[in-house]
Amino acid sequence: MFAKIIPGLMAFTALSVYTHLLTPSQYGVYTLIFTAAMFMNTTIFNWIPVGMVRFWPGGNYTEKTFISTMGALYRCLSLPIIILAVLISFFIANESIGYLIAWLILLCGFVSHRFGLMLKTAQMQPNSYAIMLISYSVLALSLGSTLAYLGWGAMGLLIGVATGMLIPSLIQTTRMWLKYDPSAYSPELTQKLVLYGMPLAASFLLDEVANVSDRYMLAWLSGEAEAGKYAVGYDLAGNSILMIMNAINLAAYPMIVKLLDTKGKEAALDYFKTYATLLLGLSIPAVVGLSLVGPNIVDLVIGEQYKESVTLLLPWVSSAVFFMGAGAFYMHLPFQLGNYNMGIFKIAGAVAVLNLLLNYLLIPRMGMQGAAIATLLSFMVSVTLGFIFGRRVFPIPFPLKEVGKILLSTLLMGICLYLLKENRGWLWLMVQFLSGSTIYLTAGYLLNIGGVKQFVDDRVRARLS
């Protein structure tokens, strides 16, 4: 959680700095190239470290075997992309070659950064994970904003973010890569990673289509400036709500896998109950809180050219990001735990088609708001399909009683924030945050969400004794 909070604060700062230094059109170019690199990493490479997290905790292979096998897979996948990029450079304008090179460097940063983070997750080394992620966020913000201030525009942000990814990941993973030995390559491990990862790779492809198609279709139908404004609102929600959900998943999922492999299904499901309660207990109030307090945050940190559109979009994209996280970090986990990732692929395919269709229908009529509504509806369908079909593969608990308590506590918090939502300024933002969180935490304690009352009482008694 600490490893996600600091980068989250850096991301809020970055949004403030970038929206004051870049025009919406420049930010639109940046977000389109950034999402293109992220799209390629997610669809082509991401299944490898995800497979590592699934099989590393079992302890069936040595570190040398793992690194050597994964190195061979990375090499095979990288070569065609490099060749394709070289060929493309002969057919594009000279001024676009710089963006192509920036895209390649950013892709290398994504691949290296993702591998390093997943390696630390698989090894259950949260301190190294935190150092790597915090270093990236600080470097990316400082380098990117400096280059943008010096007049490099979108290119400056791309170079800053890529460098911020590469330096910490290389420092953290070089010692492990020194164990690479082609003779230690394992066909058996490759087969496991491919069988587990290929459906995930296809699912990641379709998920990314649903996740980023709104920005590209906005750029196509309404211009790069509209895509840039939309991306700011989406990033504001993603850097808060998705950050919380991702942090909880990163902490819990390796433990669930380890319990499943070592102690059996019952132990894993018992742990899963706590995970589900914590995931929903933090993300649901975050959505409501950001939707109500968001206009004040936008007034304080976002550039003038973006404020109106981001304020309009925030409730929609906050809800969309929540359902995206609920699918990825909850409702789709049964397919991974049950080793039936084809189920995720089928759901992702249906959602991608639906998202493209809704974007095509709604963007010409409603602009950015139509894109946000299309994304929200698509991810709601994704969660629904995951809930229906995931239970057939690997039934997971849904803490209905605890969710009721969470919703009641969130309602009380929401009433308080609704009464304060028109107030503006840093002091009022502090008041809104403290009053909302105090009411939610107090209600959660009195309602004993997830057994928190006994947990706190036991800790207090232990301290007093």
Image (cartoon, rainbow, N blue to C red):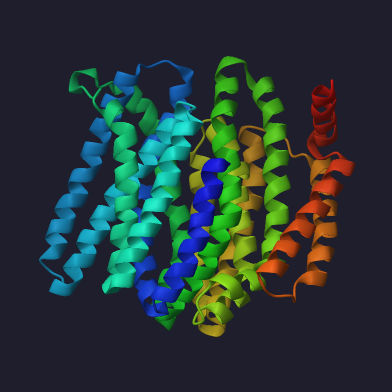
At 64% from the left and 25% from the top, the residue drawn is 268
Q: Which image quarter: residue 176?
A: top left
- The picture places residue 420, in percent across and down from the top left corner, at 79, 70
Q: Is residue 145 left or right of residue 453?
A: left
Vertical side of 161 occupied by 446: above or below:
above
Vertical side of 92 occupied by 80: above or below:
above
Looking at this view, is 18 or 273 the one in front? 18
Looking at this view, is 86 or 332 the one in front? 86
Q: Is residue 78 left or right of residue 321?
A: left
Q: Is residue 328 left or right of residue 270?
A: left
Looking at this view, is 6 or 166 the one in front? 6
The quadrant the N terminus occupies is top right
The answer to whether any part of residue 382 appears in the image is yes
Residue reaching furthest to the left: 90
Q: How many marks?
A: 0
At 63% from the left and 44% from the top, the residue drawn is 331
Vertical side of 246 occupied by 149: above or below:
below
The quadrant the C terminus occupies is top right
At 22% from the left and 44% from the top, the residue drawn is 78
Vertical side of 313 occupied by 208: above or below:
above
Q: Which image quarter: residue 394?
A: top right
- The picture places residue 158, in percent across and down from the top left corner, at 31, 61
Looking at this view, is 56 or 24 the one in front? 24
Q: Which image quarter: residue 89?
A: bottom left
The answer to whether any part of residue 352 appears in the image is no
- The picture places residue 40, in percent across and down from the top left corner, at 33, 53
- The picture places residue 39, in percent across and down from the top left corner, at 37, 55
Residue reaching furthest to the right: 446
